[in-house]
Amino acid sequence: MGSGRPRTTASATLVAALLSGLVLAALAGCKSTPKAPPPSPSAPAAPGGDSWAPPATAPAAATTQVKPFFFRAEKGGHALYLLGTIHVGVDALTELPPWVLAQLDAAPAFAMETDLSDPATVQLLVRTDGKTLAAELGDADWERLRQALGPALADGMNSMKPFAALSALSLKDLPMTAPMDMTLLNRAKTAGKRLVYLEPVADQLAAIEPYATAADIKALLDHAAEAKADTLKMVTAYRAGDAAGLKAMFDDKTLWIAAGRDPARFGDFIEATLGKRNRSWVPHLVAMADAGGGFVAVGAGHLVGPENVPDLLTAAGFTVTPVTGP
């Protein structure tokens, strides 16, 4: 890269949209969040009664089909189908190709990162230190956050950990859709499939929370225009199936540096949010395959980023191939 100020704020966007399904629980936990307008037939409501809604300024979802990050991992006559998701911004039922949903419907089991349907999940995002986000940010930055998210949404996050507000801030420019992960989970539950969760909610939060602080919120507010451009670039790369485009975003250290961290320790973020978690999922995926296979939906960053799941499964003896059509 050239000299001067780092370019974008990709790390916050990646955590919120491609690496952690906890953003859905964070948004669902804000009881004062305004409801979205009644959905049209082409944009179904979030399944399971989720109460969150992106800010009213979020753009409408596209209706063209995406080129999915989709892989088949086969070993011992059993197959896993791996779908990389974007947690919000793409409508699973109308924008995924029908042949992807057909594989979900045919699968005996469904796996996702963690159990986001458990109401207790929200409690893990509530502060227990007696502080508020407003006090932690200070008056000026709290007012900036309220202006960015809208007073109702921001106020609903005042007693929650900074991760909730950082997630909402990172995702506010994404198209307004039902959460992809929850839509797929609901479809699997309706079909009576066996459900597999790859990690406890508490473990996922513990991995990500150190990189979602009040300092990160301030940094993202300082880089709002760049963050919006980065979000749009990420969605464009996701829709196009552009793995190289998404991979490039993992090299960006802007938020890391702006939050006062040592750029030499950026690898800690990648290891905690990707490498360590991906490795811990492999035994669960092997067991799922041994039990007959199934359909796996995780954030796309886990399938194309550093030390990704397809590479780890290949090392575990699976034959992994991209799936580009029926």
Image (cartoon, rainbow, N blue to C red):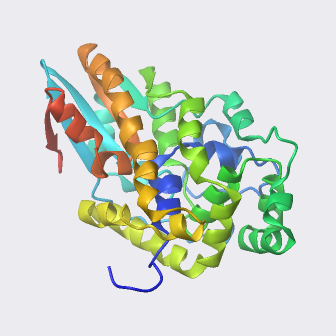
Q: Nearer the viewer, residue 20 or 88?
A: 20
Residue occupying the point 31% across, 66% down = 248
In the figure, 100 relative to 105: above or below? below
Residue 282 location, quadrant: top left
Residue 326 location, quadrant: top left
The tally of labels here is 0
Q: Is residue 60 visible?
A: no
Residue occupying the point 74% across, 34% down = 123
Residue 168 location, quadrant: bottom right
Measuring from the top left, give residue 128's x and y in whole percent. 81, 37
Query: Which quadrant would the N terminus be assigned to in this image?
Result: bottom left
Q: Nearer the viewer, residue 23 or 38?
A: 23
* 175 relative to 26 in the view: left or right: left
Measuring from the top left, give residue 65's x and y in whole percent. 33, 60
Q: Nearer the viewer, residue 62 or 151?
A: 151
Residue occupying the point 72% across, 72% down = 148
Residue occupying the point 47% across, 75% down = 8
In the figure, 112 relative to 225: above or below? above
Measuring from the top left, give residue 231's x and y in whole percent. 48, 69
Q: Nearer the viewer, residue 176 or 291?
A: 291
Q: Is residue 199 visible?
A: yes
Measuring from the top left, give residue 315's x and y in whole percent. 16, 32
* 233 relative to 117 in the view: left or right: left
